[in-house]
Image (spheres, rainbow, N blue to C red):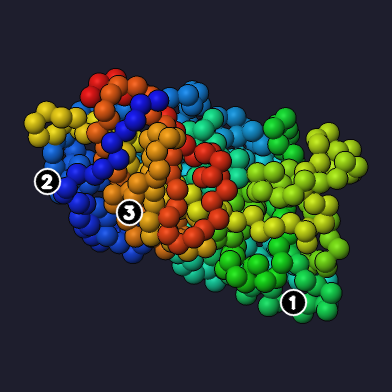
Amino acid sequence: MKPVQQTTPSTRRRFLHASAGTAAAAWLAPVEQALARGSATAKSPGSVLETVPFVGEGDFPLETTVGAGLGRRRALDLSTLWPATLVTPQDRFFIRTGCPDRLPPTASWKVRIHGLVERPVEVAAEELRREAADMGAHLLECAGNSRAAHFGLMSAALWTGVPLERLLERVRLLPRATRVLVSGFDEHSVLDPASVPGASWIFGLDQIREAGAFLATGMNRAPLSPDHGYPLRLVVPGWYGCTAIKWVNEIALVDEDAPATDQMREYAGRTHQDRGGPRDDFLVRTGRRPEGPRLARDFQPATIDSAALPVRVEKLGADGGNALYQIVGILWGGRAPARALGIRLNPDLSFAPVEAIGPGDGHTWTLWSHTFQPPAPGRYRIELSVRDPPARTRRLDMGFYAREIEIAGV
């Protein structure tokens, strides 16, 4: 691994407003001129000569839907992210599980609200569609997102829907009701060895309120597509996608002794839960080693930590013929928007400030960029750290989102 010059060009990035005509104008806000194609700085030292590929990440197909049912997958090509493309169209939005082939007819779809309530009720999806309002832009990331899929199991959309808390106002809760079990239809003819059937998650009432969870009826001003949960999908802003239950048909009020669902146990490791005990009926039901606590109350919120990822590296032509390389990336997650980001291209060096970071609100992703001049050809490992405000960054700390490039010439 070669040392690398971490200093940035004297010309700092300037920020410009994104086109107000785009669907995302309200949340893209200012975006840096550096991210316009073929421009590296406010003085544009040259056009993009080539894009440098990341190495060691396999050959999972991007922007291609593969498999079916529980095994259905589609990964977004993050290298295509620009200020005007931060809202992901439905036909490119990542897929972790496809629409069940056994899904009942949806024309008369209803959600049953029951459990620890005085009187159960059923609410028609059509009624919720009429009540739906703008829920804003939110990002979803699969808890199993990894370099095997080029980190493409994440996307952002503009959502419409109904707050879950408002839906719960339709029933009178019994005193013992402290948690909400949200379940969706998940019966498939063909099973997937990498997945446990059953889509459900249990939340504390306070967690639902704090996150602003809602039942989504649409994405990007259009109805949900079947693969994205039509007619109803739960969205819990700031939480991993494993909690975003699709094809929601049941909401049950439960108490503090409710056992964790199989889906919670399946994703326990990927949502940073404590290990489960050696003896557990989860092993009997699923054939898998138990993970996570047995009771839902002992699960930590499956929230996304502050994270950052390089999505493309461009070789630029510069004044005087000295090659510059521009790293473009995304920043997301955490309880508050990150204001400062550190970067290094050699594990032996300390982190240096990333040159330019777009503004963010913590609900979706924002773009950042950084230029560097490598002193020699070779392999460089791009690592990032959130510098301000202090934040939980477990995946960043373990190098989970680090990516490597091979520089052939300087």
Label 2 and label 3: CA atoms lie apart by 18 Å
Would you identify the image quadrant in which residue 68 lies? top right
Q: Which residue does the image show at 43% across and 39% down from the upper left?
A: 383
Q: Which residue corresponds to mark 2?
A: 43
Q: Which residue corresponds to mark 1?
A: 171
Image coordinates of residue 394 in percent, x first then y, are: 57, 48
Judging depth in this view, the residue of 30 and 217 nearest the camera is 30
Q: Earlier in the sequence, mark 3 or mark 1?
A: 1
**Residue 51 vertical placement versus 202 (above, below):** above
| 279 relative to 365 in the view: left or right | right
Q: Earlier in the sequence, mark 1 or mark 2?
A: 2
Q: Which residue does the image show at 54% across and 71% down from the upper left?
A: 131
Image coordinates of residue 110 in percent, x first then y, are: 69, 61
- Farthest left residue in view: 320
**Residue 236 vertical placement versus 227 (above, below):** below
| 318 relative to 82 in the view: left or right | left
Q: Which residue does the image show at 60% across and 40% down from the upper left?
A: 144
Q: Secondary structure at mark 1?
A: loop
Q: Which mark is residue 283?
A: none
Q: Are marks 3 and 1 in contact (CB under 8 Å)?
A: no
Q: Residues within 10 Å of mark 3 (few under 14, many from 20)?
A: many
Label 3 and label 1: CA atoms lie apart by 45 Å
* Three-letter code for the amino acid on which mark 1 is drawn: Val
| 351 relative to 82 in the view: left or right | right
Q: Which residue corresponds to mark 3?
A: 357
Q: Secondary structure at mark 2?
A: loop
